Structure formats: C-alpha cells, structure tokens
Image (spheres, rainbow, N blue to C red):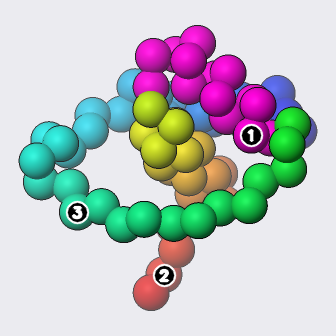
Amino acid sequence: MRARFAHLVSKALGAPLPRRETIKRVQKNLSLIESDGRRLQGLARRDGLSQARLLGRALDAYEAHHGKLVE
C-alpha cells in the first residue's frame, strides 16, 4: 500500500503549481503520530519542498487514486 501511495505522490510532483501569490493560505493545527511527523519532515527535506507543499501534493495523489472531493 505504501509503495502505491508513494508512486501516486511522485506522479503528482510533476503537476504544475499555481503561482505562489495567487494561493490563499489557512493555518491548521495537525496532531500527527510522531513517526509520521518524522516522515513528513524527512520527505520534504529530501525533495526540497515545504511540509505544506508536500501535504498538498499528497492530497492531490490521494484524490487521483480515490476521486476528487465533491463539495
């Protein structure tokens, strides 16, 4: 399962991103399992991304696999 998710995340990394100035931001308090927090920090550092950008790309990959959220 992790390998499949990692593949989807790497696929999402190639997607073009909106210009930084046009992105509205929100502040969220997340409570993560310690090991997930270390993974988030390590993957972001490895790939030269902010943790927020990595989470956004992970959400993109999740939606690519499970379908977009319908509001």
Can residue 10 be seen in this snapshot?
A: no
Left/right placement of residue 6 relative to residue 35 reads left
Closer to the eye: label 1 or 3 = 1
Query: Residue 46: percent from the left, percent from the top?
Result: 58, 12
Magenta region, residue range: 36-49
Does residue 56 sit above or below 5 in this rendering? below
Contact, mark 3 vs mark 2 (Cβ under 8 Å):
no
Query: Residue at the bottom extreme?
Result: 71
Left/right placement of residue 43 relative to residue 54 reads right
* Number of residues whose C-alpha sits closer than 10 Å to that of mark 2, classed few (under 14), some (14–19) or many (20 or more): few
Q: Which residue is mark 2?
A: 70
Instruction: Judge whether residue 35 is colored magenta.
Output: no
Q: Which quadrant is home to the C terminus?
A: bottom left
| Dot placed on the residue nearer the N-terminal end, 3 or 2 | 3
Q: Which residue is mark 1?
A: 37
Q: Residue at x 74, y 40 (%)?
A: 37
Q: Residue at x 63, y 52 (%)?
A: 62
Label 3 SS = loop
Left/right placement of residue 17 relative to residue 59 reads left
Q: Amino acid at mark 1?
A: Gly
* Number of residues whose C-alpha sits closer than 10 Å to that of mark 3, classed few (under 14), some (14–19) or many (20 or more): few
Q: What distance separates the C-alpha of mark 2 from that of mark 1?
A: 28 Å
Instruction: Judge whether residue 39 is colored magenta.
Output: yes
Q: Which mark is residue 24?
A: 3
